[in-house]
Structure formats: C-alpha cells, structure tokens
Image (cartoon, helix red, strand yellow):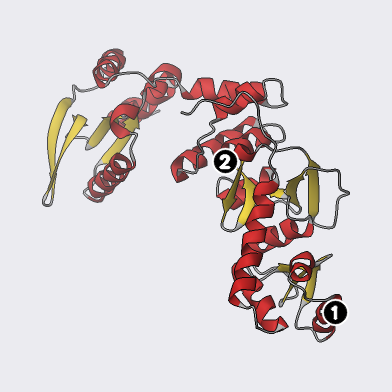
Amino acid sequence: MRAMARETKVEHQIGAKHWSRIGEAVASELEAAGVDAVIAAFLERQHDVVARWQLLQLGIGRGAIRARLQSRRLHLIHRGVYSPSRRARTQTAAFTAAALALGPDAVLARRSAAAHLGIRGGSATRVELIVPRTLPARDRIAPIHALLPGDEITIHHGIPVTSAPRTILDLASVLPRPAVEQAIERAEAGRVWDALSLRDLLKRYPRRRGTRALRAILADSLIGHGVTRERLEAEFRAFLAPLALPPPEINAPLSVGIDTFVADFVWRKERVIVELDGFATHGTRRAFERDRRRDRRLQAAGWRTVRVTWRHLEIEGAELAEDLIRMIRPESCAA
C-alpha cells in the first residue's frame, strides 16, 4: 500500500482531460469530415450520446445542431445532451448523458457510481454526480457539491467515476450497514479496488458521516484473518467434541470419476464433508475456482459439502452445530 501524500490535491480535471482526449481524437481523425461524421464519431466513443459543448468546441455551430434536432436525427436526452434515440438505451448511456449534462468536471458518485462499477444494483431513479460547484437538481440528475482529490477518481467504461473505495465511503453515509457490506463483498469479488484503500480514506476523512459504521465493518472483516490452518483444525476438533457425532475421517481421500480429492473432515456413510476455509489457503482466485469445481463434482456424486470458517466457529457456533447434527444425525432431531 503506498503512502498517502501529506497534502491532497483537488483535481476534478481528470474528467475534463478524459473528455478533451475524446474530442482531440475525433478532431484528428475527421479534420476534413462533415458535421454528421463528427457527431457519429462522438456517439461511437460515448455510448451513443454527445454534448453540445463538445460539438461547439470542434466548431459545429448551434444552427447545425438545431437542424439535426428538428429533423430528428438527434433527440434531446438532457439539456445540451443528444442521442439518435429518444432515450438512453443502456444504463451506461444514461450515466454518460448525465455526466456530460453537468459538464466536463462531473464525476459519477454514490449509488450511481456503485452501479457503474458493478458493486451494487442500479435501481435509483436519479443519477448522482459530484461537481466542484453548487448546481440545482435536474430531471433524473442529482448534483452533489464536493471537491474530489485526483486519487479518488477513475475512468471506468469511458465515464469519470469515484474509485471503488471512495464510492463505498460515500455509500456508508447514505445506506444501511448490510448494503455497504454487500458492496464491499462485490468489490472484493470483482477485484475493483484501488491503490488508495478504504483505510486510507478513513484517515483522510475521520469524522465523515458513515465512517463509524465503516470502521466497524472493516474490524469485523478481520475476524480470523491471521488464523493458521493448524489452529483452525484444532478449533474445529474441539467444536465437534461435545456434539456426539460419529467420528469423522480426517484428511481423507475421495474419488469422483478420474478426480481424487482430499477432504478435511469426512462422514463417509452420511456422505457429508466439512472443508475448513481459511484465507491463507482459499484467498486467491485460483483457489476459489478450484474449490467451486470440487464442490460441484462432489455434489453431483451425492456428497454434501459444508465450508466452515473461523467466524462460523467463533460467532455462529450454535447455528453451525445444529446444521451439522441435522445433516449427520437427522434421527436425533426428529420430534
């Protein structure tokens, strides 16, 4: 993790530079082309939307824009933003149109940023954007006045957006804890993290709304983080002792077709397997994929696999014990 700079530079220019590069590319490719070719080039690069200010920068006059609106070759999506369609066809197009409507320094934020980054569903009716000045709300657009440092902004699928950690920090101020936890889980699963971590941001903004809940979530996520496999196995053996279950086979080989697996704890007669999940051995993408393939193969062969973590043992022990008893000794649970 890189060290944080002592001074945070406010740099909304990241978005402006992004849109400017698109304009320069269009201008260099279509120097001698007509108006329609220039518009088409923007539409191709910007999810089928273009802003009036972009066209004006390349010398396309208001009359030419008005003529294409009157002939319905372009349609108004937001004030000063156009598309060949009557409405944005995709969520990404809607986000692009809203960003362009607020100008080159607008940055997709909060729920909209989370939806664009794929760490939350996109059910909000208004697109939320951060801008470095106060703007009134528009139809389907919610401007948020804030100053963003450059290391909290990224470009994702062609749109300036708050980074995943900054997005989660913002979500913590407007959403309940379960929704924030789910966003963090999706960010981890999708590997959309950034060099500037959540912990960096909590140091940068120690008293922001939602930081207390976010600190609690991060502290909770560390449960069992440094536990070795040996300690986890010893803890699970101790956990099994009072349950009066048949003794399991430990580190037992199992064959399914041409595959041979070594399972942590096996009740062969009951066809139940317990796998101990510690981050050290199951925290990589390759291990994740391997474990899911093994679970699938064993399930197809009639085995039931239970994955047990340190958290399950420490916090959910009673529930885990009840589930194992029902799977291994169902007759003891009969009324």
Residue at the far right in the pictured view:
136
Dot 1 corresponds to which residue?
66
Quarter of the C terminus within the rendering: top left
Where disc 2 sits, the SS reads helix
- The location of residue 151, given as percent across then percent down, is 60, 38
Q: Could you tell me which residue is drawn at 61 percent across and 28 percent down? A: 201
Q: Looking at this view, is 75 or 29 the one in front? A: 29
- The location of residue 21, given as percent across then percent down, is 62, 61
Q: Is residue 117 above or below residue 268?
A: below
Residue 249: tell me if it is visible: yes
Residue 121 is left or right of residue 75, and the answer is left
Q: Could you tell me which residue is drawn at 51 percent across and 41 percent down? A: 187
CA distance separating discs 2 and 1: 39 Å
Mark 1, residues whose alpha carbon is within 10 Å: few (<14), some, or many (≥20)? Answer: few
Where disc 1 sits, the SS reads helix
Residue 266 is left or right of residue 224, and the answer is left
Q: Looking at this view, is 14 or 59 the one in front? A: 59
Which is closer to the viewer, label 2 or label 1? 1
Q: Which disc number belongs to residue 164? A: 2
- The location of residue 29, given as percent across then percent down, is 58, 75
Q: Looking at this view, is 275 or 73 the one in front? A: 73
Mark 2, residues whose alpha carbon is within 10 Å: few (<14), some, or many (≥20)? Answer: many
Q: Quadrant of residue 101?
A: bottom right
| Mark toward the start of the polypeptide (2 vs 1) | 1
Q: Could you tell me which residue is drawn at 28 percent across and 48 percent down? A: 296
Query: Please, what is the three-letter code of the amino acid marked with disc 1?
Result: Arg
Q: Is residue 27 above or below residue 331?
A: below
- The location of residue 74, given as percent across then percent down, is 76, 78
